Image (cartoon, rainbow, N blue to C red):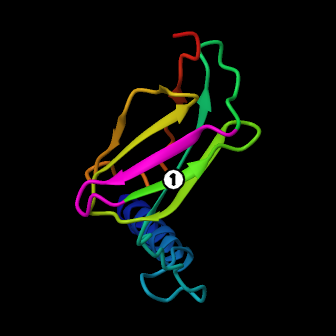
Amino acid sequence: MKQLFIALAFAAVLVSCASAQLTLPLGGTSSEPTPKRTKPTSKTLTGTVTDKSEQPIPGAIVYLKNMKTLAVKSFFAQRDGAYRFPQLALNTDYEVYAEKDGKKSDTKTISQFDDRFNPTIHLRINLDK
């Protein structure tokens, strides 16, 4: 009787293991392809230009300096103070600042070691100076 009980228990374990193996997907047999994630090849810098009371400064000029080539790009801030510099090289440091009516914001740096592909930098100009 004891041997019969052991044999039945062993059979039950084998059946449960076999059924568990049938329900688990095997590696590489999935019918759905694994989506390939492509690494971006550039960064896009965005941000806003505001005054000390957080009001947007439309028309402020935002300057972006490439620290490798020393080339400078500029962008006029939109009505909401927003600016955007797309297609920035991943392996380059940049400096960004804004200017309006002779007043200038602090200069901020975007490092090549910053792994964000869409960094955001808010610039503030104190127009009261």
Residue closest to the eye, 12 or 24:
24
Horizontal and vertical percent for residue 46? Answer: 55, 47
Amino acid at the residue labelled 1: Ser
Q: Identify the secondary structure beneath mark 1.
A: strand
Foreground residue among 5 and 29: 29
Instruction: Locate residue 66: give its quadrant.
Output: bottom left
Magenta stretch encompasses residue 61: yes
In the depicted structure, whether residue 119 falls above or below residue 69:
above
Q: Dot 1: within a 10 Å radius of its alpha carbon, few (fewer than 14), some, or many (20 or more) residues?
A: some
User: Between residues 129 and 57, which one lies in front from this camera angle?
Assistant: 129
Please tell me in which quadrant of the rendered image residue 23 appears.
bottom right
The N terminus, quarter of image: bottom left
Report whether 114 appears left or right of 61.
Answer: left
Residue drawn 27% across the image and 59% down it: 92
- Which residue is depicted at the point 71% across and 36% down? 58
Q: In the rendering, at what x and y percent does residue 27 appear?
A: 42, 82
**Percent position (x, y) of residue 26?**
45, 82
Residue extending farthest to the front is 102
Q: Which is more toward the observer, 69 or 43?
A: 69
Q: Which residue is mark 1?
A: 74
The residue at the point 77 percent across, 39 percent down is 79
Number of numbered callouts drawn: 1
Of all residues, the one furthest to the right in this rendering is 79
Tell me the residue at 46%/67% (across/down): 8
Q: Is residue 116 magenta?
A: no
Q: Residue furthest left?
A: 68
Q: Which residues are magenta?
A: 59-71
User: Measured from the top left, where is residue 2 in percent x and y?
Assistant: 37, 58
- Where is 51 relative to 5, above or below? above
